[in-house]
């Protein structure tokens, strides 16, 4: 039994080991698929859906960060359907989240011609959340949070095993929080800084940097 599979991505044939994700298979061909929640050292949560690709004979777009390559699979990473999906995702993010400190996402917005005002008029995260400055090391600004799950993962099983962060509330009010909404010094946080390091936006930021921005 062979330990590899051969598939076609954007017209190019590639052979990869079984278990390889479509994201990594595409990377072998030099094809970069955009991601937000994915981080190479963390378990892919597949929540942002920006990496979805079109797989022939599949009804819905597939998240490339978790779907594994299969023998004979034909994948399109930049079809009109894929681009439209990514465009809408970015427009929805921009309608509620402050993305000024997210240069990578800003680049995606330009790349896919996303209209940041398309869904304007709803309740923004700036109106929902204040900045949490409850410790001397970093702040939490959930108005800039895209809920990518990275900070929760790095604080939990993937790296630190501290479990200081979790999801708070549900639905439109969902946000990263501490258990029982405690101030960070009252949680199990050891202030390692890993969550700040993996944050793709300005939602988690060093206090010194944040104070300089206020000047």
Image (cartoon, rainbow, N blue to C red):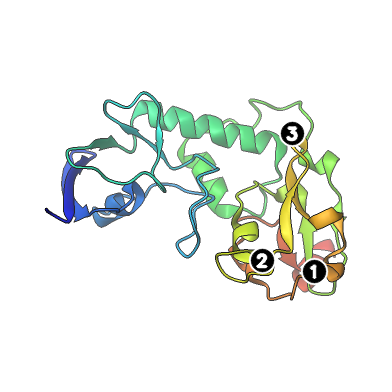
- Nearest to the observer: residue 184 or residue 130: 184
Vertical position of residue 162 compared to residue 54: above or below: below
- Nearest to the observer: residue 215 or residue 91: 91
Residue 66 can be seen in this image: yes
Residue 88: x and y in percent read: 54, 29
Quadrant assignment for the C terminus: bottom right
Image side of residue 2 versus residue 23, left or right? left
Give the labeled residue for mark 3: 172
- Nearest to the observer: residue 136 or residue 181: 181
Residue 19: x and y in percent read: 29, 53
Residue 113 can be seen in this image: no
Give the labeled residue for mark 2: 196
Nearer the observer, disc 1 or disc 3? Answer: 3
What is the CA distance from the residue labelled 3 to the residue labelled 2?
24 Å
| Quadrant position of residue 57 | top left
Residue at left offset 55%, top offset 48%: 105
What is the CA distance from the residue labelled 1 to the residue labelled 3?
31 Å
Residue at left offset 40%, top offset 31%: 61
Give the farthest residue toward the left. 1
Image side of residue 42 versus residue 99, left or right? left
Decide: few, some or many residues near mark 2? Use Cα within 10 Å; few <14, some 14-19, many ≥20.
Answer: many
């Amino acid at each position: 039994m062979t330990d590899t599979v051969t598939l076609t991505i954007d017209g190019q044939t590639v052979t990869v080991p079984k278990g390889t994700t479509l994201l990594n298979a595409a990377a072998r061909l030099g094809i970069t698929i955009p991601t937000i929640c994915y981080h190479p050292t963390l378990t892919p949560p597949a929540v942002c859906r920006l990496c979805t690709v079109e797989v022939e004979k599949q009804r819905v777009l597939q998240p490339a960060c978790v779907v594994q390559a299969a023998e004979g699979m034909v994948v399109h990473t930049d079809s009109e359907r894929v681009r439209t999906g990514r465009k809408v995702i970015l427009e929805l993010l921009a309608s509620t989240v402050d993305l000024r400190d997210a240069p990578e996402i800003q680049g995606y917005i330009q790349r896919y011609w996303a209209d940041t005002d398309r869904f304007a008029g709803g309740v923004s995260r700036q109106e929902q959340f204040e900045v949490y400055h409850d410790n001397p090391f970093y702040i939490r600004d959930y108005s800039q949070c895209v809920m990518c799950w990275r900070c929760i993962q790095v604080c939990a099983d993937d790296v630190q095993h501290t479990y200081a962060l979790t999801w708070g509330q549900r639905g439109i009010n969902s946000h990263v929080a501490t258990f029982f909404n405690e101030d960070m010094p009252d949680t199990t946080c050891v202030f390692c800084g890993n969550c700040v390091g993996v944050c793709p936006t300005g939602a988690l930021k060093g206090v010194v940097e944040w104070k300089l921005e206020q000047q």
